[in-house]
Image (cartoon, grey):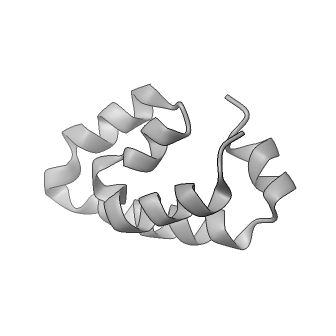
Amino acid sequence: MKSRVTAGVLAILLGGFGIHKFYLGKIGIGIVYLLFCWTGIPSIIGLIEGILYLTKTDSEFQQKYASA
């Protein structure tokens, strides 16, 4: 079971490198984040995703994001 708070903090702090995607088991999209990290776009998306992760309840998070 993946932690909502861990995923949210990783997305906010290291989202530009896709670390939160690797943590959630989404390796393919994590590699895409790494390939485009130099553009800054993944950092913005990671910040938004981190906020979304942290605003969900634990059950919503597990159902939507952590069920790989």
Please name the residue shown 53% across and 31% down the image: 25
Please name the residue shown 86% across and 53% down the image: 59
Q: Is residue 61 left or right of residue 31?
A: right
Q: From the top left corner, tell me how far across and down residue 17 is, in percent.
A: 28, 49
Q: From the top left corner, tell me how far across and down residue 38 is, in percent.
A: 13, 53
Q: What quarter of the picture does the N terminus occupy?
A: top right
Q: What quarter of the picture does the C terminus occupy?
A: top right
Considering every residue shown, the one lying at the far right of the view is 59
Please tell me which residue lies in front, 63 or 10.
Answer: 10
Q: Quadrant of residue 47?
A: bottom left
Q: Is residue 35 left or right of residue 49?
A: left
Q: From the top left corner, tell me how far across and down residue 36 is, in percent.
A: 22, 45
Q: Is residue 31 left or right of residue 58?
A: left
Please name the residue shown 44% across and 37% down the image: 22
Please name the residue shown 68% across and 44% down the image: 65
Figure disc tally: 0
Instruction: Indicate whether 7 appears above or below 32.
Output: below
Q: Is residue 37 left or right of residue 52?
A: left
Q: From the top left corner, tell me how far across and down residue 57 is, in percent.
A: 81, 65
Instruction: Indicate whether 52 appears above or below 60.
Output: below
Considering every residue shown, the one lying at the far left of the view is 38
